[in-house]
Image (tube, helix red, strand yellow):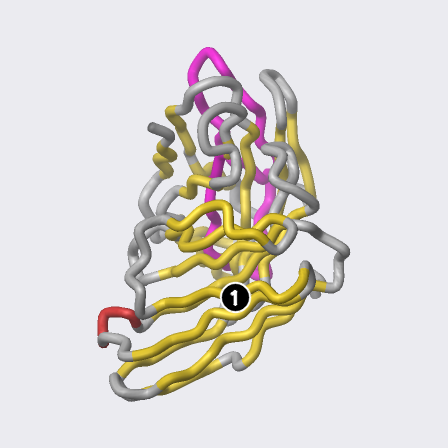
Amino acid sequence: GNSVTQMEGPVTLSEEAFLTINCTYTATGYPSLFWYVQYPGEGLQLLLKATKADDKGSNKGFEATYRKETTSFHLEKGSVQVSDSAVYFCALRSSSGSARQLTFGSGTQLTVLP
Amino acid sequence: ETGVTQTPRHLVMGMTNKKSLKCEQHLGHNAMYWYKQSAKKPLELMFVYSLEERVENNSVPSRFSPECPNSSHLFLHLHTLQPEDSALYLCASSHDLADYNEQFFGPGTRLTVL
């Protein structure tokens, strides 16, 4: 079946530090990959997505590249801000099998200190 | 604002109560979802509706009963819940069930079962 593994948190960084949150996946077919962010007290918001190999999703300074050879979709940001403090979820949606279902990782809590 | 609203935002209920959660989407989407988010666990998909028809039920106990009267509204009826059902319940919608379409999430209902 499909699965997503992301690095366990919590992650604590100083403002302007470089961020990497690792995400690897197992899936049948050619999945679409997503990063969602959940700010305190809110639901999940789509941060970025990539639908095929070598695609790069980007938004708000965050980037992730769909690497089929390493089955990875690591999230990066060059300079984090306090406002980036949130929980980040990696997710996939497979093009075969139960295409209705988003499979989520367990989430990574990020705290950015001023 | 993602275009998906949920009410109530917080709910405390006893094990013998009956309550309902409501979700409304203003995006013209055809698919709607219920998820359960428990502490330190990945999001769990509970139900999927497409064009008001239930298309997936992930082995959810019968004390949770969904209802989709039209493509804009989704309800989750609750009765005789257990304390372990306490969680954040998230509603989401997407244009359809295609794998490349992202899901838009509501802010969630924080449910506490006493």
Amino acid beneath label 1 = Glu
Residue A18 drawn at (x, y percent): 52, 40
The residue that disc 1 covers is: B67
A6 w.r.t. A15: above or below: above
Looking at the image, which residue is at 23% across and 70% down? B84
Task: Give the residue displayed 45% in from the left and 51% down from the top.
Answer: A13
Q: Quadrant of residue A26?
A: top left
Residue A11 visible in image:
no
Q: Is residue B34 above or below residue A62?
A: below
Q: Chain of mark 1?
A: B
Residue B29 percent across, percent down from the top left: 71, 52
Instruction: Tell me if residue A69 is in the magenta stretch.
Output: yes
* Residue drawn at 51 percent across, 33 percent down: A99
In this orientation, does residue A24 appear? yes
Badge 1 element: strand
Q: Say if A109 sits above or below B79 in the image.
A: above
Quarter of image, res B91: bottom right
Residue B56 on image: x %, y %: 45, 46
How many marks the image carries: the answer is 1
Q: Which residues are magenta?
A: A63-92
Nearest the camera: A80 or A23? A23
Residue B23 location in percent, x, y? 59, 69
Left or right of B63? Residue A12 is right
Relative to residue A87, is residue B83 depicted above or below? Answer: below
Residue at 61% x, 39% y: name it.
B97
Q: Nearer the viewer, residue A97 or A62?
A: A97
Based on the picture, tell me whether residue A48 belongs to the magenta stretch: no
Identify the image quadrant of the N terminus of chain A: top left
